[in-house]
Image (cartoon, rainbow, N blue to C red):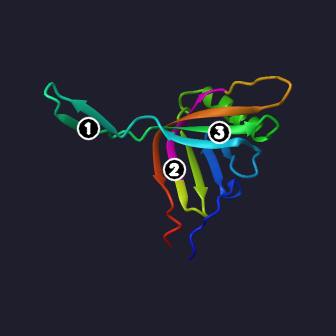
């Protein structure tokens, strides 16, 4: 199989599932140009330097991360996400129970985020241009495989 040398957001799919339903917010959901970002919240390494200059590395076990979803203000997904947010904030029974998956079958990239909660409700600006809404999610655990499909 030839290696893909072209990227397109059209290939990217993402889903949020949890109490209140399942929502697709990848290609076709009116994502803003800035798209969707996945980021670990902590460095994997902590370097400690002793009094004599000796280094010590500590491997950090945390897999916690953040997902930032940017949607056009006119996206119908905003309604779905706001409804899901309202269901989940009603009880701690529903909070932090989401799963976010992000996949690009062309590049083989796969993100799987579990124990996911809304960090906060998005800021909503009313201005000359419509802009976007940014949904920030905290992930208890984020597993990543980059380029898994490319090696097939």
From the viewer's perspective, is residue 21 above or below residue 118? below
Residue sitting nearer the eye, 98 or 125: 125
The local secondary structure at tag 2 comes to strand
Up the image or down, 38 lies above or below 122; here it is below
Q: Nearer the viewer, residue 124 or 50?
A: 50
Question: Furthest-front residue in view?
Answer: 53
Q: Which residue is mark 1?
A: 58
Please identify the quarter of the rendering in which residue 123 is found.
top right
Please provide percent x and percent y for residue 37.
59, 42
Whole-percent x and y of residue 23? 68, 46
Q: Dot 2 corresponds to which residue?
A: 112
User: Dot 1, crowdedness within 10 Å: few (<14), some or many (≥20)?
Assistant: few
Residue sitting at x 53%, y 66%: 149
Crowding at label 2, few (<14), some or many (≥20) Cα neighbours within 10 Å?
Answer: some
Distance Cα–Cα, label 3 vs label 1 = 32 Å
The stretch in magenta equals 111-121
**Rendered residue at 53%/51% (across/down):** 111
> Is 62 placed left or right of 56 in the picture?
right
Q: Secondary structure at mark 1?
A: strand
Q: Secondary structure at mark 3?
A: strand
Q: For this view, does 152 lie left or right of residue 53? A: right
Residue at (27% x, 34% y) in the render = 47
The residue nearer to you, when weighing 104 against 118, is 104
Q: Circle 3 sits on which residue?
A: 69
Location of the N terminus (image quadrant) = bottom right
Q: Would you say the magenta stretch is mainly helix, strand or loop?
A: strand
Mark 3 and mark 1 lie on one chain; the one further toward the N terminus is: 1
* C-beta proximity under 8 Å, tags 2 and 1: no
Q: Is residue 119 magenta?
A: yes
Question: Where residue 83 sits: x, y (%)?
Answer: 72, 33
Q: From the viewer's perspective, tell me whether residue 79 is left or right of residue 61.
A: right
């Amino acid at each position: 199989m030839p290696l893909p040398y072209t990227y397109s957001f059209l290939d990217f799919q993402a889903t949020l599932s949890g109490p209140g339903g399942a929502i697709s917010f990848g290609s076709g959901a009116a994502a803003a140009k800035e798209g969707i970002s996945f980021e670990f919240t902590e460095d994997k390494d902590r370097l400690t330097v002793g009094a004599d200059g000796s280094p010590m590395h500590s491997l950090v076990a945390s897999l916690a991360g953040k997902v930032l979803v940017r949607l056009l203000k006119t996206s119908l997904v905003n309604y779905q996400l706001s409804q899901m947010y309202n269901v989940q904030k009603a009880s701690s029974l529903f909070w932090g129970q989401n799963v976010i998956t992000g996949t690009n079958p062309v590049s083989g990239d796969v993100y799987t985020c579990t124990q996911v909660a809304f960090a906060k409700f998005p800021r909503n600006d009313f201005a000359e241009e419509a802009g976007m809404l940014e949904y920030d999610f905290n992930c208890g655990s984020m597993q990543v495989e980059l380029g898994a499909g490319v090696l097939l």
